[in-house]
Amino acid sequence: MSFDIAAIRAADAPGVKNASPNGFNGEEACRMTRYAGLSYKLSSIGFFEYNPHYDINSRTANLIAEMIWYFIEGFSSRQDDIPTFGSNDFKRYIVQIGENQNDVVFLCHKITGKWWMDMSFLQNDDQRYERHHFIPCSKEDYDQAMRNELPDKWWQFYQKLM
């Protein structure tokens, strides 16, 4: 992930050559980097456009340090609740919708209660993309499938592939 410090308003981060009076505030920037740290798909972060020559009282440098702290805090708070093939950490629910249609497979993490739909039946790529086969969903999506209705998230993903 790259974070352009110029996206933060000048009052919170003056250490940018062309600082703007508008933009994210410091709290929002810290919140974004924390959420970025929580993502399993993210492995690195970079901060760009910082210029110490324009930084007043090291305000921008301090904000960047705080953003790094929030990124690390998010990284350390990651929970391994993303499904992988063969994982025993999930309850598996198979719902048949209509006659002669594919089953919809739902997974629910036994500890966190996070729900996923297994869309691997649509995939032909190799196993290194296995996490892309699982779509986050909710208990309501499962309940909808139990009423013999395909969830909207299933349709959205299906249409992207076709």
Image (spheres, grey):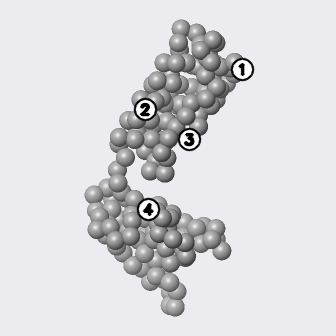
In the image shown, does 14 or 139 lie closer to the viewer? 14
Residue with the mark numbered 3: 1
- The answer, for residue 140, to whether it is visible in the render is no
Residue 114 placed where, x, y %? 37, 59
Q: Earlier in the sequence, mark 2 or mark 3?
A: 3
Q: Nearer the viewer, mark 4 or mark 1?
A: 1
* Dot 2 amino acid type: Tyr
* Quarter-of-image position of residue 53: top right
Question: Marks 4 and 2, Cα distance to the nearest angstrom?
Answer: 27 Å
Q: Residues within 10 Å of mark 1 (few under 14, many from 20)?
A: few
C-alpha span from label 1 to label 2: 25 Å
Separation of residues labelled 4 and 1 (CA atoms): 43 Å
Residue density around tag 3, few if under 14, some if 14–19, many if 20 or more, within 10 Å: few
The residue that appears at 49% across and 47% down in the rendered structure is 42
Determine which quarter of the picture holds residue 71.
top left
Q: Quadrant of the C terminus?
A: bottom right
Q: CA distance from mark 2 to mark 3?
A: 14 Å
Residue 90 coordinates in the image, percent (x, y):
32, 66
Left/right of residue 106 with respect to residue 17 in the rendered view: left
Type of amino acid under label 3: Met
Q: Secondary structure at mark 3?
A: loop
Which disc, if any, is residue 18? 1
* Disc assigned to residue 138: 4
Against 122, residue 12 (above or below) is above
Q: Nearer the viewer, mark 3 or mark 1?
A: 3
